[in-house]
Image: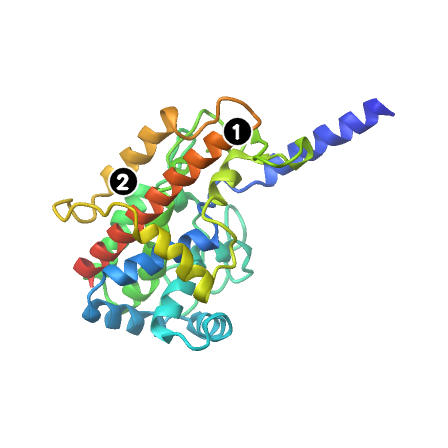
């Protein structure tokens, strides 16, 4: 009986590893935090231009509906900007889009294609093109036609967050931490998760909205700001920073994560989110 339980557990672990997406970065809360910090960094003119582009996106009605539900008294433009930040992950489960060798689906108006583009979210030894994708999207947002700008903006908002998650920029030959299992503090051995998921969840509960989101943002605002002299839109620098963190900051020394490592990881994640938000806002100011 023990053998069959062990075998079933092994099969379950293998299935979880196969199903664990290598391209998710930061949970929804993390991406909304980054978008909120970026909005604060942007000029009023850039905010208006971003809001105008998002209003013309095919999924604007969905974002607006969620904004009304999650923050009914808030600024609609700001709320929709935050909701759009998770779009690039959400299309992974959207039947309108396709991936891999799937049959192409009908294009939405103005879209260049309906691919899910999972390869845009990361770059490691096995592939991925997050850095070159960001540069192409920035060019489209800055100099493309209106349809290209509408398509590029939600992608850019999201991928600037992704490139600041270290495990989207490499790993230890484990698919960006998706094949390394860890046990977070205060959990039993039966609550193991992938290292990638552990880092994704460090920003906190995914459903952060309104006053709960604002409380987290207040903590992030207290972190040291970036220098005003830093180059704007330096994708190579952001990628290199994430790669450097992989060496000593991301992988715990043991499978069971200690309270000390967890506290350190939370600090690293907060600093990356703070930097991503400021950098995104400054870049959008220039591109828009």
Q: Can I make out residue 107 in this image?
A: no
Badge 1: few (under 14), some or many (20 or more) residues near its Cα, within 10 Å? some
Between residues 277 and 143, which one lies in front from this camera angle? 277
The quadrant in which residue 241 appears is: top left
Relative vertical location of residue 258 with respect to residue 155 in this rendering, above or below: above
Residue displayed at 55% across by 56% down: 93
Q: Disc 2 marks which residue?
A: 238
The kind of secondary structure element at disc 2 is helix
For residue 284, side relative to residue 105 (left or right): left
From the top left corner, tell me how far across and down residue 158 is, in percent.
Answer: 37, 53
Relative vertical location of residue 150 with respect to residue 132 in this rendering, above or below: below
Q: Which quadrant holds the N terminus?
A: top right
Badge 2: few (under 14), some or many (20 or more) residues near its Cα, within 10 Å? many
The quadrant in which residue 20 appears is: top right
Among numbered discs 1 and 2, the one appearing first in the sequence: 2
From the top left corner, tell me how far across and down residue 110 is, in percent.
Answer: 35, 68
Between residues 51 and 101, which one lies in front from this camera angle? 51
Relative vertical location of residue 122 with respect to residue 79 in this rendering, above or below: above
Q: Which mark is residue 258?
A: 1
């Amino acid at each position: 009986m023990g053998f069959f339980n062990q075998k079933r557990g092994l099969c379950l672990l293998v299935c979880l590893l196969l199903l664990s997406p290598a391209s998710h970065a930061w949970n929804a809360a993390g991406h909304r935090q980054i978008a909120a910090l970026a909005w604060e960094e942007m000029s009023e003119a850039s905010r208006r231009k971003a809001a105008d582009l998002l209003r013309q996106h095919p999924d604007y009605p969905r974002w607006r509906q969620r904004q009304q539900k999650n923050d009914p008294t808030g600024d609609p433009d700001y709320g929709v900007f935050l909701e759009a930040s998770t779009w690039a992950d959400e299309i992974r489960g959207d039947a309108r889009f396709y991936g891999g060798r799937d049959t192409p689906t009908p294009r939405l108006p103005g879209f260049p294609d309906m691919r899910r583009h999972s390869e845009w979210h990361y770059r490691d030894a096995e592939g991925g093109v997050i850095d070159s994708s960001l540069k192409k999207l920035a060019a489209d947002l800055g100099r493309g036609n209106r349809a290209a700008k509408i398509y590029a903006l939600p992608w850019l908002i999201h991928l600037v967050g992704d490139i600041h998650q270290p495990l989207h920029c490499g790993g230890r030959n484990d698919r960006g931490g998706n094949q390394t299992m860890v046990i977070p503090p205060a959990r039993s051995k039966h609550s193991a998760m992938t290292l990638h998921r552990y880092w994704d969840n460090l920003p906190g509960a995914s459903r952060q909205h309104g006053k709960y989101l604002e409380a987290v943002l207040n903590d992030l605002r207290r972190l040291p700001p970036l220098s005003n002299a830093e180059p704007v839109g330096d994708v190579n620098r952001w990628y290199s920073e994430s790669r450097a963190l992989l060496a000593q900051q991301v992988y715990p020394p043991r499978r069971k994560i200690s309270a000390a490592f967890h506290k350190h990881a939370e600090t690293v994640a907060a600093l990356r989110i703070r930097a991503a938000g400021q950098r995104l806002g400054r870049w959008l100011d220039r591109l828009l």
